[in-house]
Amino acid sequence: MNLTRLQFASFQTILLMVAIVAAACVAGSSCGYRMRSASKNFADGIRSLGIPTFVNHTQRQKIEQQMTRALLREFTVRTGIPVSSASAGVDAVLQGEVRNLTSSPVAFGTDTFGSAFIVVVQMSVKLVRTRDGAVLWEDSDFVYRERYILNTKVTDFFSEEGPALQRLSREFAASLVSAMLNR
């Protein structure tokens, strides 16, 4: 095959462009940032986790179930270890109590009713290794807050507290798991 000088130059240019695109793809996909496996960061020797339903010491029904569900989901996603709601047959158990729940107005509408509220949940949480009962992590005063807006239009009224508590549960779980993994 006999290539002219112009064809050879075009071929080299195309080859160079392909090499640049390939290098850019490789550089973009391996920029040095890697997700570190949280399960390796989890407490020593813990390969499975149980999170039984928290104890509720408040007047708010089912808040302990929302918090527990959110923690089960967050630990499953973030650690990669088997997580269940059982407290038996696991390496560690996360125990918790919802100690206090308050909802207070922080802004008022024109009719003097609260239009924005803050929900504050106070909890006691500890991670216990099952084989020897050792407390691996504990926070007896874990507090989390969520703001919500009350729909003040009477014809369209619905309580925002339920959705606010769901958001609070998810964000609380993310915050708690981060605190435990970064200890």
Image (cartoon, grey):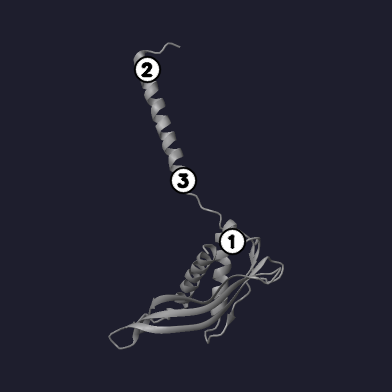
Q: Residue at x 56, y 58 (%)?
A: 38
Report, in whole angstroms, how far the alpha carbon at label 3 lies from the one at label 1.
23 Å
Residue 18 to residue 8: above or below: below
Query: Disc 3 marks which residue?
Result: 32
Query: Disc 1 marks which residue?
Result: 42
Q: Residue at x 41, y 34 (%)?
A: 21
Query: Which element carries disc 1, helix, strand or loop?
Result: loop
Do the residues bearing badges 3 and 2 touch, measured as CB atoms within 8 Å?
no
Q: Residue at x 39, y 82 (%)?
A: 157
Query: Which element carries disc 3, helix, strand or loop?
Result: loop
x and y, in percent, of residue 81 in the image: 62, 60
Q: Earlier in the sequence, mark 2 or mark 1?
A: 2
Q: Of the residues shown, which amino acid type is indicated by label 3?
A: Gly
Q: Residue at x 48, y 79 (%)?
A: 121
Task: Categorize mark 3 by other alpha carbons within 10 Å: few (<14), some (14-19), many (20+).
Answer: few
Of residues 15 and 129, the one nearer the viewer is 129
x and y, in percent, of residue 60 in the image: 52, 84
